[in-house]
């Protein structure tokens, strides 16, 4: 399920952000609460997941020309409350029209049932969101990272084995 702060008047449905079609997009407009203006899009995973990485694609049309300075956070509850959010990534740069940006959660993976993309003082325009996550539980993943790889730190888990100096999360299943 996807929820948004407020859809723009001519916007497609929020599900356009996860329809595997870069030609469709959702425009989420700002709301104001106690003199703070922001827009947000929330994705309910349906269960608690550990998020490692997120890819976001901007719209190809001019409507996406100002997409920048947004945060991706994860929370167990849907409420947009900065006290209960675990930050995955803060993207500051401009996202070029039609381009995709990939963001590994920093400093490391975050867990929750809801992922929230939030932007202060501007609309969110999103063509596509891809989330790389797993269900992780301690009873299935009880391992010692130092025994796995001395250079591997928990803050640098990744599913991309070509990255130097990171742990390949696919290999963690071997423990």
Image: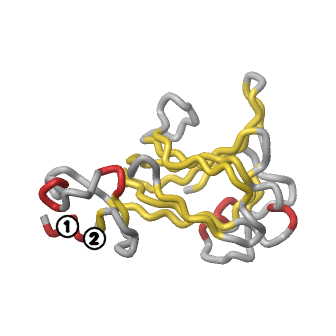
Q: How many marks?
A: 2
Residue 114: give x, y in percent of width and height.
Answer: 48, 48
Q: Quadrant of residue 171?
A: bottom left
- At horizontal 61% and vertical 65% (from top left) the residue drawn is 101
Residue 75: give x, y in percent of width and height.
Answer: 46, 41
- Few, some or many C-alpha atoms within 10 Å of disc 1 (few <14, some 14-19, many ≥20)? few
Secondary structure beneath dot 2 equals loop
Residue 72: give x, y in percent of width and height.
Answer: 56, 49
Residue 35: give x, y in percent of width and height.
Answer: 78, 24
- In the picture, which quadrant includes the N terminus? bottom right
* Residue furthest out toward the top: 34
Dots 1, 2 in contact, CB < 8 A: yes
- At horizontal 60% and vertical 67% (from top left) the residue drawn is 18
Image height of 21 relative to 49, above or below? below
Question: In the image, is 90 to the left or to the right of 131?
Answer: right
Question: In the image, is 21 to the left or to the right of 140?
Answer: right
85 and 31: which one is in front? Answer: 85
- Few, some or many C-alpha atoms within 10 Å of disc 2 (few <14, some 14-19, many ≥20)? few
Residue denoted by label 1:
173
- At horizontal 55% and vertical 31% (from top left) the residue drawn is 82
**How many angstroms separate mark 1 from mark 2 (CA)?**
6 Å
Coloration of the structure image: secondary structure
Secondary structure beneath dot 1 equals helix
Name the disc covering residue 152, or none: none
Name the disc covering residue 170, or none: 2
Question: In the image, is 169 to the left or to the right of 142?
Answer: right
Q: Quadrant of residue 58?
A: bottom right
59 and 102: which one is in front? Answer: 102
Question: In the image, is 60 to the left or to the right of 116?
Answer: right
Image height of 87 relative to 139, above or below? above
- In the picture, which quadrant includes the C terminus? bottom left
């Amino acid at each position: 399920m996807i929820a948004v702060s407020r859809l723009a008047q001519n916007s497609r449905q929020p599900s356009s952000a996860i329809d595997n079609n870069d030609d469709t997009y959702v425009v989420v407009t700002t709301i104001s609460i106690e003199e703070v203006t922001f827009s947000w899009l929330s994705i309910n995973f349906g269960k608690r997941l550990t998020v490692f990485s997120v890819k976001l694609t901007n719209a190809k049309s001019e409507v996406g020309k100002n997409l920048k300075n947004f945060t991706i956070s994860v929370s167990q509850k849907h409420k947009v409350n900065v006290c209960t959010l675990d930050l995955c990534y803060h993207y500051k740069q401009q996202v070029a029209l039609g381009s995709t940006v990939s963001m590994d959660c920093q400093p490391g993976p975050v867990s929750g049932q809801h992922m929230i993309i939030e932007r202060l003082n501007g609309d969110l325009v999103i063509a596509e969101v891809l989330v790389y996550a797993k269900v992780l539980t301690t009873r299935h993943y009880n391992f010692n990272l130092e025994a796995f790889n001395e250079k591997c730190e928990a803050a640098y888990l990744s599913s991309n084995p070509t990255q130097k100096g990171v742990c390949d999360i696919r290999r963690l299943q071997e423990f």
